[in-house]
Amino acid sequence: MSSPKFDIVVYGATGFTGRLVAEYLAAHYKGDADLKWAMAGRSKDKLAAVRDEIGAPRDTPLIVADAGDPASLKAMVEQTKSVITTVGPYMLYGNELLAACVAAGVDYFDLCGEPVWMRQKIEQHEAAAKKSGARIVFSCGYDSLPFELGVFCAQEEAKKAFGAAVPRVKGRVREMKGTFSGGTAASMRAIFEAAAKDLSLVTMLRDPFVLTPGFDGPKQPLGNRPLYDEDLKTWTAPFVMANINTRNVHRSNLLLGFPYGKDFVYDEMVVTGPGEQGEAIARKVMAANNKLSGTDVPKPGEGPSKEERESGHYDLLFVALAPDGRQARAVVKGDRDPGYGSTSKMISECAICLLRDAADTAPGIWTPGAAMGHKLIKRLEQHAGITFRAEK
């Protein structure tokens, strides 16, 4: 493709999360003449209104493109080096855009938490992406970037402490203030509805190695009920995002050539505390998880206020366990609510990192951490309010 006009196109810029991505780029990269970006969506009038409301420059390019109009997507893709898409559920609205990016050799970033769709796209497009030069990066938001990189950091600490990576890591959510996005909830409903129509998808949803075609690893913890964690001396509850995060962690291990070993075991739970109170809270958390697939959640296009986003945060612990019981720990913390404030910064910095810091990343279908590793960690710490630290 010859001389694209843009480095990044934000597709879905009139939606709630897409607007936040555009707002972040407009504010954080104001005056950066080397970053050429555009806003895209179905309505030019709505795009112009959002551009003005978020304080983006008046000359910010606006592109009309619609998931239901493949020609418009092709025309959009041919103008840019990369596309950030916040238009989900991806199984409903992502097929044509992904195909267009693969065909044109254009980099692609999304917030996907739909493992079955991702597996289908890996099988359908990975060989073509490698041939065309496209770098396809799934799951660049709260699902699953902090978790994927948290495991990476825990294993780095294990190497320092024990001399080698370990076959067992536990991911534990210690604190999380904020809401899941309406897009996440819509994606979960779409997954359940698709599985109800095609029961073969249920087997894929239950497979911890659904994102590692050709590799099937050891049995993994189910994480589907409250448990007392002997290593951490606390009760834990099921974590609603574990179903996608654990799959992405195993894909990273595969993509990196199995640095964690082929016998690697990983699970995620929510820490609820010791004693009877911890157990009671764990049971309440489990009951609350069921609401995400209900109606009492944000709808796509809805979300928390600016104040709510800025007062949110999260604290994630990753414990690498040596066979003799010793522990190495890493902690990932974010300074905004996970589903919106932090996610919009993460996906923006993923796109800029691949563009500027990891241009030598090979074509193919990636997880963010496997594609960019330490370079992405550095950029997230410098720009996105996320910290990665060892913990004694």
Image: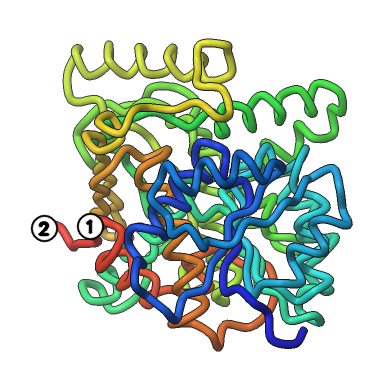
Q: Is residue 228 above or below residue 43?
A: above
Three-letter code, disc 1 = Arg
The total number of labels drawn is: 2
Q: Which residue is mark 1?
A: 329
Q: Is residue 236 above or below residue 281?
A: below
Three-letter code, disc 2 = Lys
What residue is rendered at 84% in x and 71% in y?
103
Circle 1 crowding by C-alpha within 10 Å: few under 14, some 14–19, many from 20: many
Residue 336 visible to the viewer: yes
As helix, strand or loop, the secondary structure at mark 2 comes to loop
What residue is rendered at 63% in x and 83% in y?
362
Q: Position of residue 276 (x, y in %)?
A: 20, 12
Q: Position of residue 291 (x, y in %)?
A: 50, 14
Q: Position of residue 331 (x, y in %)?
A: 23, 54
160 lies left or right of 148: left
What residue is rendered at 42% in x and 38% in y?
339
Q: Is residue 164 above or below residue 336?
A: below
In the depicted view, which residue is nearer to us: 245 or 6? 6
What residue is rendered at 42% in x and 64% in y?
349
Q: Which residue is mark 2?
A: 392
Tell me how far mark 2 sits from mark 1, CA to CA: 7 Å
In the depicted view, which residue is nearer to us: 273 or 121? 121
In the depicted view, which residue is nearer to us: 60 or 118? 60
The part of the image, by quadrant, that contains residue 231 is top left
Q: Please state, as top left, top right, bottom left or bottom right, where the N terminus lies in the image.
A: bottom right
Q: Please state, as top left, top right, bottom left or bottom right, where the C terminus lies in the image.
A: bottom left
Sequence-wise, the earlier of marks 2 and 1 is 1
293 lies left or right of 30: right
Circle 2 crowding by C-alpha within 10 Å: few under 14, some 14–19, many from 20: few
308 lies left or right of 88: left
Query: Disc 2, disc 1: CB below 8 Å?
Result: yes
As helix, strand or loop, the secondary structure at mark 1 comes to strand
